[in-house]
Image (spheres, helix red, strand yellow):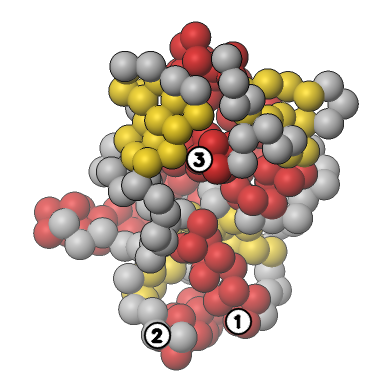
Amino acid sequence: MIFCVEDDVSIRDLMIYALRTSDYEARGFNDGRELFEALETSIATGEMPEMIMLDIMLPGDDGLEILRKLKSNTATKEIPVIMTTAKGTEFDKVIGLDTGADDYLTKPFGMMEMIARVNAVLRRTGTGSKEPDIIKVGPLTINGNAHIVTAGDEAVELTLKEYELLHLFMKNPERVFTRENLLSEIWGIDYRGETRTVDVHIGTLRTKLGPCGKYIETVRGVGYKIRSGE
């Protein structure tokens, strides 16, 4: 199930139609109040949406405020979110990505592009994925099926984006990723402007890994890698 939050009825109906013809279940909502009412039911029944498509310009709370509420709630923080908006400025993109959005569609967008983005985000966030059970690099271990990270003997709680960054590094030890590479791989966009969001996420990831954070190295003038040895 994909939830579409869009106050323009014609756009919302078109999005839902395109999703349903692509074999997704979809429901539409006019604003944040309707969305959170539906999410309360989802939480109670355990049938959470696979994704939320969220417009920024909405009556009541705007999309960025709704996104903050979603990401601050343990019951909803892991739901992938694609922002949709008529705004296309660098500022809006950076704020949305820093707040936890998984991708960004600027209106007007085609329905084929929308479906392609939906498919890409669902693949990237693990829906239907068959990743290896265990990945080890030095003292770091990822149990892919259980979505558990351990640093040494300590379990580490990561956000979805931090987990995806670490998972990408650990699948590719010693490979150097530029910031643009990471934006494309993790956030699903070809975005060559402000890359501060990558540095922020790397910083918090290193902190949470404690002494094992030193395995994620900065390659000066290029980007980041995880080293495979001691």
How many C-alpha atoms fall within 10 Å of the one at disc 1: few (<14), some, or many (≥20)?
some
Looking at the rendered structure, which numbered label has been put on residue 167?
A: 3
Identify which amino acid the numbered label 2 is placed on: Asp
Label 3 vs 2, first from the N-terminus: 2
Q: For the residues carrying marks 3 and 2, which lies nearer the camera in this image?
A: 3
Looking at the rendered structure, which numbered label has been put on residue 131?
A: none
Counting from the top left corner in percent of width and height, residue 88 is at 74, 56
Let me know if residue 183 appears in the view.
yes
Answer above or below: position of 107 versus 20: above
* Disc 1/disc 2 C-alpha distance (Å): 14 Å
Let me know if residue 165 appears in the view.
no
Image quadrant of residue 188? Answer: bottom right
Identify which amino acid the numbered label 3 is placed on: His
Counting from the top left corner in percent of width and height, residue 150 is at 36, 25
Q: What residue sits 32% from the left and 71% below the top?
A: 1
Label 1 vs 3, first from the N-terminus: 1
Along the viewing direction, whichever of 196 and 134 lies nearer the viewer: 134
Q: Is residue 95 left or right of residue 61?
A: right
Residue that carries the numbered disc 2 in the rendered image: 23
Along the viewing direction, whichever of 90 and 155 lies nearer the viewer: 155
* Disc 1/disc 3 C-alpha distance (Å): 31 Å
